[in-house]
Image (cartoon, rainbow, N blue to C red):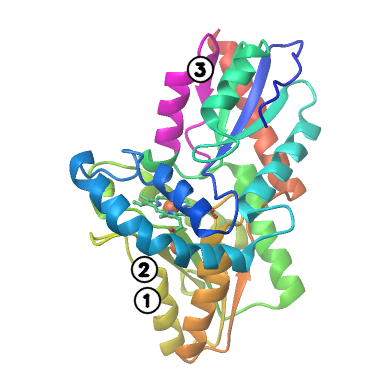
Amino acid sequence: MTTAPAPIASGTAVLLVNLGTPQAPTPGAVRRYLAQFLSDPYVVQIPRLVWWPLLHGLVLPLRSARVARKYAGIWMEGGSPLAVHTQRLAARLQGLLPQVLVDHAMRYAEPALDARLRALAGAGVERLLVLPLYPQYSSTTTGTVAALVERERGPMQARVVEDYATDPGWVDAVAASIRAHWAAHGRGQRLLFSFHGLPQRLVDGGDPYAAQCQASVAAIARALGLDPSGYAMSYQSRFGRERWLGPATDATVRALAAEGVRELDVVCPGFATDCLETLEEIAIENAQLFREAGGSRLRYIPCLNDAPDHAAALAAIVRRELAAWDRAG
Ligand SMILES: C=CC1=C(C)c2cc3[nH]c(cc4nc(cc5[nH]c(cc1n2)c(C)c5CCC(=O)O)C(CCC(=O)O)=C4C)c(C)c3C=C
Ligand SMILES: [Fe+2]
Ligand SMILES: [Fe+2]
């Protein structure tokens, strides 16, 4: 992970950046990961003097072991799903873009973003296109990646893709994955689009995330020819006590069961790769909630991960961004 990539002729590289994930499904590794993640002022905006004792005295001791057990339930042979799928997607993208170097990094944990930036600069990269693996922009995700890139890019010129929430190639890839899932596993009575949540305060303060999630849903539903009565949208993974974006996924899943929906399909187009929040929270926890509320089956539709048309959509975004960069000089 720390070896410098070979120099490339064009001096241009593409860096995929994902959130990051623990190195092992153990309380210690989860604690180290959460400590770094939840110390980022872009993610938690409580003053350090107040937050630090709470984080280290309460949140980490209470959360680490419980969350480690959840990771253990979804761990793959090659590691955490988010790490495995991100690595495979980067390899697939490199195959489609032989003229540039494709690398990947994580905002938290390994391979660390700041270390990859130094390695790329050291390998002679002059121009770096950063593609955060978040289709919808939020200051808590894309924003913190952009800030770290700006601080650590060294002599490289860097450009960050802000979002691809309604990119036609990406929308078509998501729609195709939903159609393929219906063809292989049957189609439920309703399709739920579930996105990671965000404190409502950030949305009120101008974060475009919620509007972009809505735009993604509208575009995917249009590509599928869905009637508004055929789908719903909600936000999952609430953290802490303040009000988060709603409606909440767990309440929505229960409400749909109470309404008489027996077979429910759930897709998570805010996540480029499968992770704890999809494989555990949706496919295990919410599936159980749905059954407890009277539903018969919740079918989780996987993320695009390293699907060929996912890599093709990202390659098209990269080519377009590099061309725009060339034109801008
Ligand atoms: C204040 C807390 C959090 C904000 C704001 C937040 C925004 C946010 N997160 C994602 C994507 C992912 N989050 C994941 C896990 C995760 N998220 C939080 C907290 C906030 N997220 C925590 C504490 C955790 C860890 C798990 C837990 O302790 O419950 C993941 C999965 C990581 C994995 O290893 O699989 C992803 C992906 C987005 C897109 C987002 C804002 C829009
Ligand atoms: Fe999160
Ligand atoms: Fe969660």
Residue 223 sits above or below residue 159 on the image: below
Is residue 12 located in the magenta-colored stretch of the structure? no
Write down the residue under mark 2.
248
Q: Quadrant of the N terminus?
A: top right
Amino acid type of the residue that numbered disc 2 sits on in the rendered structure: Ala
Q: Which residues are magenta?
A: 142-164
Left or right, residue 142 beside residue 278: left
Give the residue number, with chain letter if any, for mark 1. 251
| Residue for point 56% across, 22% down | 117
Looking at numbered disc 3 in the image, what kind of residue is underneath it? Arg
- Residue 99 is tagged as none
For this rendering, which residue is in front, 196 or 28?
28
* Residue 40 picture location, percent across and down: 36, 39
Q: Is residue 200 visible?
A: yes
Element at label 2: loop
Answer yes or no: do the residues labelled 2 and 1 have beta carbons within 8 Å?
Answer: yes
- Looking at the rendered image, the disc whose residue lies closer to the viewer, 2 or 3, is 3
Q: Which residue, given by chain and number where applicable, does mark 3 sit on?
A: 153
Query: What residue is drawn where x is 35% and y is 42%?
Result: 39
Q: Could you classify mark 2 by the number of other residues whose Cα lies within 10 Å: few (under 14), some (14-19), or many (20 or more)?
A: some
Q: Classify residue 76 by image quadrant.
A: bottom right
Give the class, few, some or many, for how many residues have Cα within 10 Å of label 1's Cα (few <14, many ≥20). some
Distance of label 2 from label 3 (alpha carbons): 38 Å
